[in-house]
Structure formats: C-alpha cells, structure tokens
Image (spheres, rainbow, N blue to C red):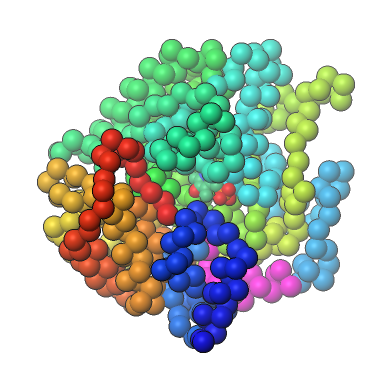
Amino acid sequence: MSLNDQWMQRDLAVLWHPCTQMKDHETLPVIPIKRGDGVWLEDFDGKRYLDAVSSWWVNAFGHANPRINQRIKDQLDQLEHVILAGFGHQPVIELSERLVEITPPGLNRVFYADNGSSCIEVALKMSYHFWRNSGKAEKKRFITLSNSYHGETVAAMSVGDVALFTDTYKPLLMDTIKVPSPDCYLRPEGVSWAEHSRTMFAHMEQALAEYHHEVAAVIVEPLLQGACGMRMYDPIYLTLLRQACDRYGVHLIADEIAVGFGRTGTMFACEQAGITPDFMCLSKALTGGYLPLAACLTTDTVYQAFYDEYDTLRGFLHSHSYTGNPLACAAALATLDIFRDDDVINANKKLAARMASSTAHLKDHPHISEVRQMGMAIAMEMVQDKASKTAFPWQERRGLAVYQHALSRGALLRPLGNVVYFLPPYVISEEQIDFLAEVATEGIDKATSQKVSVSVDADLYPDFTHPG
Ligand SMILES: *Cc1c(COP(=O)(O)O)cnc(C)c1O
C-alpha cells in the first residue's frame, strides 16, 4: 500500500472533514499532505499540487514562506500565548498599530477574535450593543445581501444566504432583512457594472427607508461575494451604501475576511469606493494563511459609546481563548512586512493581467457564460446553456469533475458549484498561471461534455451554488 493510502485509511478512520459529505470519500481520495513549498503542496507519495485556491483563500505568500517562518520561530522562543484581558504583548500592540495605519481612515480601534465567523459575531454584537448603549435598543436587526456569506456560526449564518445551509438551520437563525445583491452576473445585456450596481441600490435604499429604526447595521462582502460563486459588483454600490447608512443612522459592516489584503487589487476592497465602514472584519490572509486570527476594526465613536463605569454594563464583555495570540500576530506582522517591502499590490497587477490573458479564450467556450475578474480573483462560470445563462443542475456536480481532473494534473482547483476560479497565492509565477489556465480549460471541457444522469428536483434550491 502506498504511503498516501496508509495515511488516507488512518484519516478516514477518525476524521470528520469540514464542508464534506463523508460518504463521497468512498470513491474520492483524501489527499494527505506532507509538506508545502511556495504555491506547491506535496503528498506522501511525492505528487505535487499547485494550490490555486490558496488553501481556502488564506495563503498570501506561499506555503512554508521563509520570512514568515522565521518570524514565528523567533516569537516562539519569546512568548507563545498570554491572556489578552488585562495583559498585552509586543506583537499584538505592533499589529494593532499597523492595522490602524493601513486600513481606511477613522478605524482606530482593533478588537481581536480567532477566526472569521467569530469576528462577524463581534461586529454584530458590537453594533447592537452600541445602539443599546445609545438608548436605541430597538435597533437589533441586520440587513444583508442575497448570495452573501459571512461564516458558519449561527449568527454569522443568519446574515448569510447559502440556500441549503440556511434552509437546514432556519429554525435556529435570527430574523434578518435580505436585499437583492448587486451581483453583476445578473445584469441585463449592454448594461455596465456601475449602472447595474447603481440600479440595484434602489432595493437597499428602500429597505433602509422602511426599516432603519429597527436596524443596527448593514453587512456586506465588499465588491466580491466569494463563497456564493465569486459574484462581483461595482464600487459605486459601496459609495451609495455608505451615504445611505449615514443618512439613516445605520452602521455599515464591511466583511473583508476574504477580500482584504490585496485580493481585489487594492489592499482593502473598501478603498476602491473611498469609504470607511463602521466595522471592518479581517481574517484569512491576515496571517499569510499560517494561523487563525481575526480582527474587527472600528471607530472612536463606537469605542466611546462603550467607555464608562463598570457597573453601567456598557462594556463589551466578549472574549475568545486565543484572542490576539502572539504567534498569530507575529505571522501577521511578517505578512504585512512582505506587502510593504515587496510592493505587492503593484507587483500583483502583472499577475492579474496574466490571469486575464491566459483565460481569455474561455469567454468563447460554449459552456462558459462569463469570465469575471477582480484583481487576484478570477472566475469562470460553467452553464448548461450559454445564451440564457441556464445553470447546470447542482446535483450533477460538474465542478467536482473539474476538481478531479485538476488533481490528476497536479493542481488544487476546488470549484464553487459550477464556478471554477483561481485565487492563488501572490507568489505564483506567470508560467504557473498559464499552467492553471490549461488545466482549467481541460477540466471544463471534460466536465461540460460529460453526460450526467441524476434525478433533479428543479424546485429544490433553484439558484443554489454548492460550495462543496
Ligand atoms: C471565510 C469567510 C468568513 C468566515 O471565516 P472563518 O474563519 O472560516 O470562520 C466570513 N466571511 C467571509 C466573506 C469569508 O470568506
């Protein structure tokens, strides 16, 4: 038995993998990874896979990056962890200073959590608590966009919109107000992204007008709705949203967990609209993809509404055990150093252009309805019928066929339903981008020409994009 097979057997005997129907693994291998090196992952039999999805969008500068490794090793000999209530430490102080410096002006306070979902919970709780502290406890609802994703914990799921998951857990979820997304995939022919985004804003304006006295915050994924299929919209929507939130006295929460740290072409997506949200949630690439850490940044105004005598109960009494972990903060500092020292945002422009040119031919593919890109994220949507943009039924799992083909060719491409995408580490080379485009094209050809017979109940989750 190969080493891979041995590890796979041990794995399947004890693990329950995330976002996975475990029965799939009766036929689909689990790939045990022995080591990482730059964009490459290597299994126990020595086969290498190019990590085109940055290991679920977290990895910024490759696996086993020497500069990040060294910083963590140095930190390890100093301090591995300390309680952050009543205590501080060098990495967390320096990181907070740096985050305040590089995020949009006005975000002057940093509250830490240890993963993206709990960071969303922090923002939601803080927003509600702010209004309560301001004598407006009735502001307790949240406005969200269709297609949105904000994590897997119960409140984070409540403000998200992944049909299958929300339906399953509906009895557990908070009551939110859902507004149609400005998703430009759905724009009418001949209409620009900006026009479509502006038109779609009317729904948001209406929801704010109707519900603002009971609404604490609007939460959005700025510019790029990732988990629901890499759908994109124009910055004008964020500009209008900021203005409207101010007019109606509602907070704006920018979930930059996926888009932050250069993914959309700017360090933060909000920069493209020139706005400062009331809360900005960061995680994923924050530590270069090394360690779990999340930061919720907010304004002096929000901070001051909590600042009072203890017995007023206005303080934010929220914590997670690993809040502000020093090793994670050290990884984050090394990551920010690389952004600065290597002028990464500028350097990425060339890579983004290569991602566009290497996949340009797919625009004419009979089963690709759109190739869309924002900075270092590019997505190709597979459809049954190109003219009408009719999706393949999700039960056919066309994306899985792409995934399997890519694995056989040495690439980790994990489509979101019918959406094939590249979200690579920024250390990828132009030749490696060409390789990914080649593998994706083959995979798409294969997946879209296959005859698949499944019984499809069309009424069940009609627009559902399965992230698995
Ligand atoms: C991944 C993600 C989250 C959740 O982060 P976790 O660390 O996986 O809990 C929240 N929002 C967005 C936009 C994400 O992409």
- The stretch in magenta equals 57-73
Q: Looking at the image, is 449 positioned above or below residue 254? A: below
Who's the residue at 34% across and 61% down the image?
Answer: 400
Q: Position of residue 108 (x, y in %)?
A: 66, 39
- Nearest the eye: 119 or 22: 22
Q: Position of residue 38 (x, y in %)?
A: 51, 75
Who's the residue at 65% across and 61% down the image?
Answer: 291
For the question of whether residue 274 can be seen, the reply is no
- Nearest the eye: 201 or 14: 14
- Nearest the eye: 34 or 263: 34
Q: Position of residue 175 (x, y in %)?
A: 52, 23
Q: Looking at the image, is 436 positioned above or below residue 149? A: below
Who's the residue at 53% across and 68% down the image?
Answer: 61
Q: Position of residue 277 (x, y in %)?
A: 54, 34
Q: Is residue 60 magenta?
A: yes
In the displayed structure image, the side of residue 365 where residue 433 appears, left or right:
right
Residue 77: which quarter of the image? Answer: bottom right
Point out the image quarter for the C terminus.
bottom left
For the question of whether residue 406 can be seen, the reply is yes
Who's the residue at 18% across and 35% down the image?
Answer: 188
Q: Looking at the image, is 141 positioned above or below residue 363? A: above
Q: How many numbered circles does the render carry? A: 0
In the displayed structure image, the side of residue 441 where residue 7 appears, left or right:
right
Residue 348: which quarter of the image? Answer: bottom left
Q: Is residue 329 magenta?
A: no
